[in-house]
Structures are given as C-alpha cells and as structure tokens.
Amino acid sequence: MIKDYKINIYYGKNYPFLCRTVFDIYQSYLKKQKASNVTDEYFEEVYVNFINDKTVVDDIKVEFIRSSVSDEASKNPNTIHVSSSDKIFAINLDYLLETNLYYFIRYNEIVNKNLITNVFFQAQYNEWIDFLRNKDIEKNIIPICEHINKHLYLNTFLSSHYLTLSDIYIYYEMHKYFSGNITTNLKYPKQYKNINRWFKLITSLIHEHVSTDAELTQHLKIKEKIFNSSGGRRSGNCGDKCSGDHGKGSIASYEGKLQNAEKGKVVTRFPPEPSGYLHIGHIKAAFLNSYYANIYKGKMLLRFDDTNPVLEDVKYENSIMEDLEILGIKYEKISYTSDYFELLEEYCIKLIKMDKAYADDTNVDEMRNQRGEGIESVNRNNSIETNLKLFEEMRNGTEIGKKNCIRAKIDMSSKNKCMRDPVLYRCIVDIPHHRHEFKYKCYPTYDFACPIIDSIEGVTHALRTNEYSDRIEQYNWFIYTLELRNVDIYEFSRLAFVKTVMSKRKLKWFVENNIVDGWTDPRMPTIKGILRRGLTKEALFQFILEQGPSKAGNLMQWDKLWSINKQIIDPNIPRFAAVDMNNGVILKLTDLKEGEVIEKTRDLHVKNKDLGTCTMYYTQKIYIELEDAQMIGPNEEITLIKLGNVIVKGIIKDADDVNKIKEIIAVSNFDGDFKTTKKKIHWLPYIPDKLINCTLYEYDHLITVDKFENDNKEDWTNCINQNSKFETVAYAEPALADLKVGDKFQFERRGYFIVDEITEDNHFHLIKIPDGKSKNMSIISTKVNPQSLAGTKK
C-alpha cells in the first residue's frame, strides 16, 4: 500500500493520462484556483489528497512545469517524460474537481499495493470524452452503441478492470439519453446485451450513494467548459490510437509483450487435446490467445491436437467447442492436427534423409534413463536406409514397426534434456482414432507436430505456459532444421488455485472413484463445473485480465475470483427468502385473522427496479429460522424484512426441552420504525401448499491441502476431502417458482444461489455460489467454513 509517497506528475503534449489524478482526488487546493489565474508562464505546485483516506496516501504532489524534467525525476522509472506544461490540463482538472464525478469511485477497491504507477494507470477518461463529446448522440446513437457494446464484450468496465470516471461519464450521457429526455424508438436494453449488463452494474454502484435521478443529475453535473475549453479535440491526447475496440486501461499491461506484432497480421491459436473437459487453467490460454488477437485486430485459430487416440474422444471435442461458445470466445476456423498427418510424415522422412532423425527400438524405461544420463542409443547411428525402412514398418503397423519409434537426432549431451533426441513418432495400432478409425498406425508427438503446423497455418505468435520453457529450444530447432517460417513464442504463467486439482489424470480419478458426480460437478475446476456453480464468464475474464500475461507463477486464492463474480451478479439478481425445513419456528401474529392470506407487491431488488416486482404473501403464521428465534427476547420489537415490525409478546418452549422453541407469540406493528430494531430477519408465510420445496447444495474443496507435495498416488489420495458436499432442505417463498434453470438469485441472509435443476414435481435444486467472503453473511448456519472456502488461512 502506498504510504507517505510523493509522486511528481508531468503532463505535456503526449499525455494519455490526462485525468489520472482526478480519479483519486477528493479534496484539492487546486479547485481554489480560478482558470483566469492559470497562465502559461507559471504554474503553482498543487497538493491534493486521495479520497477520504489519508491512511493510504497522505500527500500526492502534482507539479506543472515549463519545459524540463528535473534530474531526480528523470531517474524515477515512474516519471512520464513530456514537454511543456499544459494550460488546458490545469483548467480541466480545476473544473473536474468542482464536480462530484469522483464521488462514486470506490478508491479502496483499486489500490494496487505494488504499483505506484497505479495512480496513472486509470487515465482513460479523456479517451471516452473524446469519443462521445463531439458527436450528435441522437443522430449517431446506433454506431455509438455498437462501439460501446463491442468494447464491453470482453470488458466489465470501460477503461480498466474496475469502476473509473470513464464509466461515470458515459453512463451519465447514456442515462440522460435513455431516461426520456430525447425521444427514440431504440430498444436499448434488449438490443445491446453487453451495454445492458454494464448499465445495470453502474446503476447499482452509483445508487449506493444516490437514490433519485434528481440527485444523480446533481452529482453528475458537468460544466461545458471542461469539454469546450480547448475549442475541440485537445492537442496531444491519444487521438486515434485510443479509438480501438479495447480501452487502453484494459490492455496496458498487455502492450509490447508480443514481439513483431503488427495490427491486422497477428494470428494466434488455441490447440487443446480432445482428451478431457476444459478447466479454468485451459481457459486462460484460450482467453489470452483470443484477447491478443482482438487487441491486434488479428484472428485466433482453434486446432484440436488429436495425436493420441488412446485418450481422445469426440465427446471431449464437442464439449470444448460448447465451452468456447458459452464463454463467447471466437475463433476463425477449426482444424485438426490429423488433417496434416500425411504432411507430417513427409517432414519426418525429410529429417531422416537429412540424418536428423532415426528409428529406435529401445524400450521406454531404458530410453528414459538414457536421456536422463545423456547416453546415446545404439541405434542412433543407423543408416538412413535402415531408418527409412523401419519408419515404413511403423506406418504399416507391423510387429517390427510396433517395437520402434522415430527420434530426432539433436544433442544427447545438451543440458536441456528436451534436446536429447526427443520422440517424433510412435506406433498405436490397436486403438482407433476418433476421426480416422484405423487409417493410421503411427502418430506424431505434439512436440513434433505443433511447430510445423503453427508455421504452415500462418500462426505468428504461439502463446504457451512457461512450464514448457525447456521445449522452446526444441520448438525452434524443428522450425530452423525444416526451414519453416518463424513463429514468435510468448510464455505466460499457468493458472493454478489453492486446494484445486488441475491434472486431467487426477481429475479422472475423482470421477472414476465417485468422489464427484462427473466432470460437470460444481466442485470440479472444469468450465462446466465452475459455471454450474454460478461463476459468470465476465468474472472469469476480468480475473484473468487482472492477472495479466505475467510469467510469474502464483498459487491463486479463490476469494478474489468469487468476489469479482459477486460484484457482477449482485446488482442484477432478485432477492428471495428461504427457511430451513427442519429447523423452523412458527411466529404467530395474534392480531391477524386466522387462515387469511394477504397479498402484497414487492420489488425483486430494491436497488434495481428494472428487475420488476413479485407477489409476496403473509398470514397469521410466519415461519422463521430457529437460529433467529433463539436470539429473540420477550417484549422485543423486531423487523420482518420487506414486511414491517412485530412485537414479541411471548415465547413458548417445549415442555421436555427448554432449549427448543415451540412457538413465538407476537402482534404486528408493520408501520413501526425499522431503524430502531436490532434484529432484522427473513421469514416465510406458513402456507405449505404455496411454498417451494428446495434442496440447497453447498460444496467445499476436494482436497485438504493447498497443493500436492508430490505425484505419488498413495500420498495425494490421503489428502482427499471425503466430506465436501452438503445438503439442506428448505422452504422458499412462492415467487421462486418463476425462475428457470441457470437463473441466479440471493436468499436473504443466506447467500447467492443458482438454479441447477427443477424436477417434475417442482422441487428446486439450488447450488450456493461462493461470494469470496471469509465470514458468514448472518447467524444463519452454513455447512461449509466460508474462510476455508475463500482460500484464506484459518
């Protein structure tokens, strides 16, 4: 966390960070300055403070200078080197500080503890001003919406991974337009799904501070001088470079990573093996390949690496395509490594004829030992003719062929063991290929096929996890030796989480041993599993985006991912109530008529009126949680959420068990002041024939350690969590019946849930969505320790 740190901020003609400080500034002596006092000859030093949080930053120094940068500042890696001070910047900053735009920025959520330059990193506000301010919104509303909607396809917010002034400004302009100030027939919310999602999110965040449109307008009032002070587009801003589909804030950490990358020419590829379901680790690779292709306006290819018929199946291939479609990851075309089998055989023959490959019948264990020790095979110096003959035996699947493999002849003394004559081809005769049946008898290895096909298909940049760093030299050897077009390689870190198994082999063990209910089990890290558990694709992409394309490998905590997910879903999902079916207590309102059922309309979300309303029922008998009943005292006034206050007159306990509450007697005081009550509880009308029967499922981690210490099966199977699934049967209010499978919602004081299944008899199976918190939402018991689930230490 930045503490007592002074930053010199230098602005000039090339400043993409015009309003960076405004984002973080709450109070400033600058707003005491008038535009008329700002001259080109001299700019006073201005001291500003961060938003209401002097414990974070006591003092931020902003300097406006004439033409040079001090020697001390020049040596500072965080200094932005520009020329001449900018009068327009000072004027704009002054006016912005007189507005309340910054009021909505929740600074504590965006402080980056290890980046001083985070102060600069959010400055895309000017870009979006430039995009919208000179346009006739009514005339250009369609292209404006198309541009913003496309940008929000893979972005939760406009300029970065969190709320910035860009969002506030564009929201304000959209809010004015679509709130009825200008008549239009555009079906805005329905036509542009990405904008609709974003609009609801920003509305929710803003309405945490304001409650009416009038108050919103007051807070968002922007003086026209801000946008007109320069008489048009400011010289020196980012200009056309900022008009792409992705805001610079969201790609800043990605820029410059790909060598030799040119706009419109970048081609990436995602090459999964169809031998299992995609998991969260795989999707990072898919996302980064897609993201870079989008940044550079290139394309991503999808290629199935179907070189091992022992493990592959068409069901996995279909599942992978389903996952990519659900996540919205686009690709240019689909290809298969097996499409190139004949060509790969030709390249293998070419290597043999160059005396760069040979046939070897050394058994697997001995070959492994020889490679480890750097010992050459006795077959390494076979004649080219012998090697060609043996390769033909392999292609025909003969007994002799099945005993052999083809190895590259590179360097058995290399310190990089990947260069010690790796295998290029091996025989697989008895197992059919899922596309070609028994057509082929020998198959290329991934390491041999990948660089060749990358080059042939026009891939410009191969993105790989850095666990395969040692194989880069091998990859390039094939490119160079076979005289193929060069492919640039960029490495990134593998995505791994605490208490999470990523190995397909180990995940298969969990499935086969019935530890989980299949590959789509919510405890599994598969895409189908985590989406079934309630994770949104927006949260997943935002999380990956925030990690950046770094090569540093870290074991990630789950709490950050689920916290992002909560931020996205919370503003846009309805609220309901549920009470444990086996641990409920009747609260009887004696002043109400027995048997009478009263209807009342309520909002599905008090802060998001767009979600609509539902019918709420109440009657003389109210059903409440046992945990709540045990906390209530005689003569206490409590609040029934969304209904009103009631006054407890008596508590009837079981004659045989004084700890068991039989019934609570109360009278209604629905118009009472809820601010005066200490207990606010959820409830249900006790109308069994109207209530919805539910089963709530909670899940814990599959393993009890952050990661396995070794690959010994006996060791890692001892770390299995044998008790990771929990069930609670409950009643839910009648309005829940309107939901469908896949819908998300919140049970008041219980947490977030997703509808997993609805049976024919209308029984709802609901899965609890983690929220990233390490504490319970209320006293209502949960079956899983939230602290453990979030990944934090106990």
Image: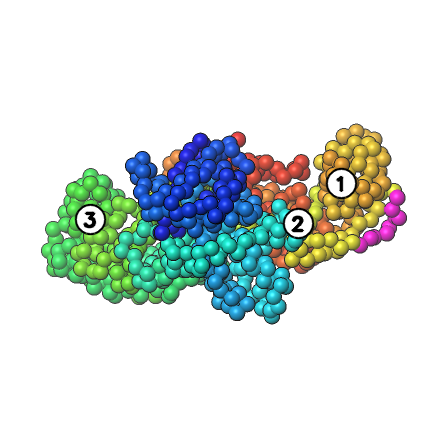
Q: Which residue is mark 1?
A: 674
The residue identified by callout 3 is: 421
* Numbered mark located on residue 211 in the image: 2
**Dividing the picture into quarters, in which one does residue 627 lie?**
top right
Q: Is residue 300 left or right of residue 476?
A: right
- Horizontal and vertical percent for residue 656? 81, 30
Is 699 situated left or right of 258 in this image?
right
First of labels 2, 1 by sequence position: 2
Ranked by sequence position, the earlier of labels 3 and 2 is: 2
Q: Nearer the viewer, residue 725 or 198?
A: 198
Q: Is residue 491 left or right of residue 588?
A: left
Which amino acid, by three-letter code, is at mark 3? Asp
Q: Is residue 455 magenta?
A: no
Count the marks. Answer: 3
Is the residue under label 3 in contact with that under label 1 (CB below 8 Å)? no
Q: Which amino acid type corresponds to the residue marked 2 in the rendered image?
A: Ser
Spatial CA distance of label 1 from label 3 is 77 Å
**Residue 236 in sight:** yes
Residue 197, percent across and down? 56, 57
Q: Is residue 164 visible?
A: no
Name the one closer to the observer, 428 or 121: 121
Task: Give the mark toward the camera: 3 or 2.
Answer: 2
Residue type at the position of mark 1: Phe
Q: Residues within 10 Å of mark 2 (few under 14, many from 20)?
A: few
Query: Which of the image's four quarters has the N terminus?
Result: top left
Q: Earlier in the sequence, mark 1 or mark 3?
A: 3
Q: As rendered, which of 3 and 391 lies closer to the eye?
A: 3
- Left-right relation of 187 to 389: right
Residue contact at pointers 2 and 1, CB within 8 angstroms: no
Q: Could you tell me which residue is drawn at 18 percent across and 59 percent down?
A: 482
Q: Which residues are magenta?
A: 591-599
**Mark 3 vs mark 2, CA separation in Å:** 70 Å
